[in-house]
Amino acid sequence: MSDPVNIDTLIDKIRQEAAQRQTVSQYQPPANIDAANRIRSSNIEALLNAASAKSQIRTDLPAKLKRFPWSLGRGFGKAALKTYSFLFKEQRAVNFSLNQALRETLLLNQSLVKKVSELQAEISDLQARLDAIEEKE
């Protein structure tokens, strides 16, 4: 059989580790954090959709510019749109890339939030098991 002193030392170490884990696992996120994250994600998606819509190539002049001197002829407006499109071509590419990067980041963030929730549930389960084992002793 094992020496009783070693078992007592081992039990003390387990209790110390359990106490350390308990202080870590005592943090409980607010109950409405999932709802808040969903709202934030929805807001971010709406902003990204708006940015995506604004980053499209203009095919028509804005309503404010449909008056003199732009109204003199369709050719003048078309030339202005082509010039605008040419000048901001690289900016549209940057905007598109940033938009895609933000969408990927949002998906990654949602995945990490889900994983954190799963890990918190697992920690709670392990803590309950550990408490049950300590009660049996």
Image: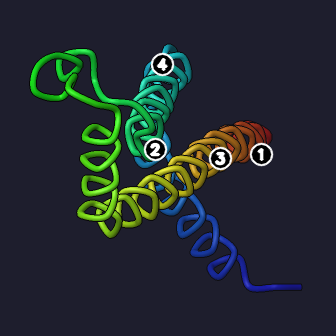
Asked if disc 3 and disc 2 are in contact, CB closer than 8 Å, the reply is: no
- Identify which amino acid the numbered label 2 is placed on: Gln
Q: Which mark is residue 39?
A: 4
Pick whichever of labels 1 and 4 is earlier in the sequence.
Answer: 4
Q: Secondary structure at mark 3?
A: helix
Cα–Cα gap, marks 3 and 2: 47 Å
Q: How many marks?
A: 4
Pick whichever of labels 2 and 1 is earlier in the sequence.
Answer: 2
> Is residue 125 positioned above or below 7 on the image?
above
Return the residue at label 1: 133
The residue lying toward the viewer, choosing from 87 and 123, is: 87
Pick whichever of labels 3 and 1 is earlier in the sequence.
Answer: 3
Of the two numbered discs 1 and 4 in the rendering, the one whose residue sits closer to the viewer: 4
Q: Is residue 102 left or right of residue 35?
A: left
Across and down, in percent, residue 39 comes to 48, 19
Return the residue at label 2: 56
Return the residue at label 3: 123
Across and down, in percent, residue 136 comes to 80, 40
